[in-house]
Amino acid sequence: MKKIKLLQYHSICSLIAGGFLILLGITGSILIFNEDIDQALFAPYQVNDTAEVLNLDSATAAVQKKYKNWNTRIIHFKKGESIVFNIRRPEQRMFVFVHPENGEILGAIDESTHLTKWLLKFHYSFHSGVIGRILVLIFGTLFLISLITGTLLYRKNIRKVLLFKIKLKPNKRRAFYSALHSYIGVWALLLNLILAITGVLLAYSVSVAGLKTPKEPEPPLVATSLDKVLSTIDREIPEFHPSYIRLASSKKAPIVINGSFEDDPFVYSIHYNKILVSNTTGDIEKVKKVSEQPLIYKANSMITPLHYGQFAGLIGKLVYCLIGMSGPVLSITGFIIWYKRKNTNHKNGLKPKL
C-alpha cells in the first residue's frame, strides 16, 4: 500500500475518533485505580473492632428479605470486614453493606451515583444506551486501525525512536509535534495495541448484550448454607480461593462461586473459574477451571484483566495509567500535525490532503 494511502487512512481514523479517544483515555486511566477508589469510598460502611467472624447466611437472608427480586452477588466477604453485596435489576444496581457478625444492613449506595461505576458506564457507553455502546465499538475500532496504519507508516522510524535518534526541536513546532507524536506512539505502541484489541472485544460483547431485552429477575431464596459451602470448598478444594459469589438467578440455576486457583497465571480472570453449587443441597455440582479449558476460553478470560490492568500492582497501574493517557496525547499531537500540514499546503497552493 502506498504511503499516501496509509497516511489518509491513518488521518481519517484518527480525526474521526480523536475527541472521543480523549474521553475514553481519561476515564480509562482513572478506572485503573477503581479498586483503590472504591476502598476509600466504602470506608464509611466498614465495621470497626469486630471479631474475626463471617456470617454469610445471616447477611444473605437480610439482603434477600429487604431487596426481593434482585439478582444478588457477593463481591467482598472476609472475616471481620463488612460484607459487600452487589444487587441488580434491569435498570438499577446497588451496593449493600452488611455487618459480618450480626447480619445488620449498614447502608447502601446506588451505582448511578457511585464515582467508579459512573465512569465505567461512561467508558463503555457514554451514558447513551445501546447507541453509546455501538459508538464506543466504532471509535475503538478506528483507534485500532490508526495504530496499525501508524505502525506501517512510520515503521522505518521505530528503531530511531527507540534509540532516541530523532531530535525534539521546540523552535520548529511542526517538527517538534511530529517527533513527540513518534516517541509517544512507539514507546506506548505495544500496550496501546493490547488496550485497543481488548477494548474492541469488550465493546463488541457489551454492544451485543445491550441489544438483548433484559428479563425481570425472579431469584429464589438461598435454601442452603453459604458458610457450609465455603467450608466444604476449603476442605475439598484447598487450592481454590473464592472471592465472588453469584446467587442463583432462577429456581433451576446453581450458585456460582468464582475465584482463583493457586497455579493460575496472573492474567486469568477470577470470573472464568467457576464452582457450581446446588442452591438447595449445597452440593458441588461442577468445577470449571480456566487452565483446563480450550484455548479460546483461556483467551477470553484474559481480556478484561489485560484491558483494565486488574493484575497489576501500584507500579503496573501507574504504567497503565500513563499509557492510557498516551491515546489522548496522540490525538492532540496528531491533530496539530494534520492542521499545520493542511495550512502549509494551503499557503503553497497545494490541494489539501488528509
Image (spheres, rainbow, N blue to C red):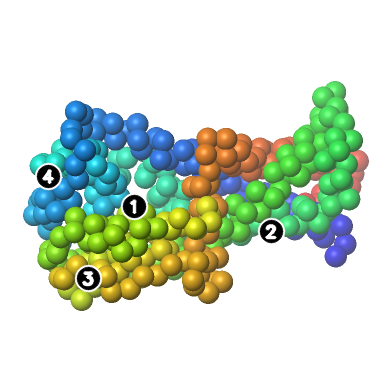
The label nearer to you, 1 versus 3, is 3
Specify whether 72 is left or right of 289: left
Label 1 or label 3, whichever comes before in sequence order:
1
In the rendered view, tell whether residue 32 sits above or below residue 241: above
State the residue position of label 1: 243
Instruction: Check contact, mark 2 vs mark 3: CB within 8 A.
Output: no
Q: Nearer the viewer, mark 2 or mark 3?
A: 3
Badge 3 is on which residue? 283
Q: Secondary structure at mark 1?
A: strand
Residue 144, visible in the rendered structure: yes
Mark 1–mark 4 distance (CA, rounded to whole Å): 19 Å
Disc number for residue 103: 4
Q: Nearer the viewer, residue 186 or 225?
A: 225
Give, as a three-letter code, the residue at label 2.
Ile
- Residue lying at 82% horizontally and 24% vertically, measured from the top left: 170
Residue found at the very far top of the displayed protein = 171
- Which label sits on residue 145? 2
- Picture coordinates of residue 341, whole percent (x, y): 82, 41
Amino acid on which the number 1 mark rests in the picture: Ser
User: Is the Cβ of the residue at disc 4 closer than 8 Å to that at disc 3?
Assistant: no
In space, the residues marked 4 and 3 are separated at their CA atoms by: 24 Å
Report helix, strand or loop for mark 3.
loop
- In space, the residues marked 2 and 4 are separated at their CA atoms by 52 Å
Alpha carbons under labels 2 and 3: distance apart = 49 Å
Mark nearer the viewer, 2 or 1:
1
Residue sitting nearer the eye, 241 or 75? 241
Say which element carries label 2: helix
